[in-house]
Amino acid sequence: MNEQEIKNIWQSSGNEEHLQFDKTKLILDLESDLKRFRKAIKYRDWREIGIALLMIPLFGFTAFKIPFLLSKIGAIVIVGWCILLIFRILGAKRKETILPTETYLDYLTKSRQYLLAQYKLLDTVLYWYVLPSVTGILLFFMGFDLSLFKQIFYVVIVVGVGIGTYLLNKYAVKTGILPRLKRVDGILKDLEE
Amino acid sequence: MPIDLEAIFLAGIEQNKDRLFRICSVYTHDAEEASDLFQDVLANIWQAMPTFSAKSSISTWMFRITLNICLRLRSTQTRRRDIFVNINKENLENIGSSSEQDEPTWLLALLRSCIKDLNDAEKSIITLYLEELPYKEIAEITGLTENTIAVKVKRIKNKLLNCMSESL
């Protein structure tokens, strides 16, 4: 078998595939779907940022007004955490733009950068999300004059949610990001050889 | 979208649809998945149309997008079988059914299986080569140099010919 025969076999498959397009329907459907998709991504990011923006003045004011020292410190920690959260989300968003119109090599390189940014974001979630939020919330509640039972109850709930968040993010890194990163690295290596 | 871009999009798709679909077919397991991926490619080409400038030909540009979308590391939510099902159901069904039933099955199946055994980098280059794109155009699409392409094509071609010959 020679090269031309292989080319002929390859190209023969398209002869049987008669695609036609209903232009209007195609365009309307695609437009509507892409808008929906982009909206969903935007919604997720702005929801997180919106909640953080709401919490900053709320806990900022509480920190100023509340008489209990521990709660005051807790509120300040929460405000700091919200600010950090906004910066981290916006920072990761900056690396999000990977256009499929780029060359294959650029597309791979940018995909790698994006995946690395996501990896760093999720892998360090303990330090910028879980610890500050758990510490802030616990301090805030501990400042109030609560019974021992209530204190234990809040600690268990808050720490439990914190551990859950941490494990979920670790799982996302392991199953969602690392395999993709490995694949992109593999392709880049193959292209360089 | 301006009418002229829309016209370019439709003309480009009409001219390249079979070639783009063939590329999709080596990145998927069956015809149904290939048509899903093809829809994804169409959606992305359409979305990117406003950024198209005549620096490269519409075909080169479409191949570039196709390759990148085929490569895209698909997560569970990107499996969009149902989303576009109403685009043109009967036509999309034709892709799968005809490719499964009418093509010179075993040789084509063998070729596709040999291509699927290649790694992603090799797949991307050989599919463009089999579409008889010149090295210059393959280089424009991939971002590699023409020399690199030439070396790689030679190597991949040998692999493919060996794979085909061994199985015949």
Image (spheres, coloured by chain):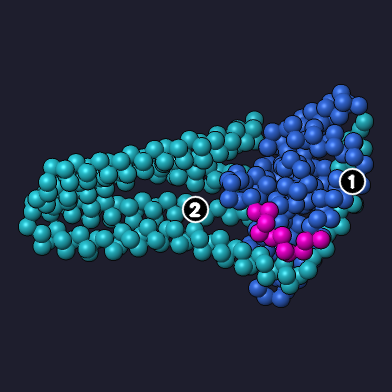
Chain of residue at mark 2? A
Q: State if disc 1 and disc 2 touch (CB < 8 Å).
A: no
Q: Position of residue B15 (x, y in %)?
A: 82, 60
- Residue B166 can be seen in this image: yes
Pinpoint the chain carrying mark 1. Answer: B
Assess disc 1: are there few (<14), some (14-19) or many (≥20) residues with their C-alpha within 10 Å of its C-alpha: few
- For chain B, the rendered hue is blue
Q: Place residue A22 in its image quadrant.
A: bottom right
Q: Nearer the viewer, residue B40 or B127?
A: B40
Q: Specify the quadrant of the image occupied by residue A2.
A: top right
Secondary structure at badge 1 equals helix
Magenta residues, as a range? B80-90
- Which residue type carries mark 2? Glu
Residue A51 higher or lower than B165, as above or below: below
Q: Nearer the viewer, residue A167 or A186?
A: A167
Residue highlighted by disc 2: A96
Picture residue at 78% right of the left edge, 51% below the top: B21
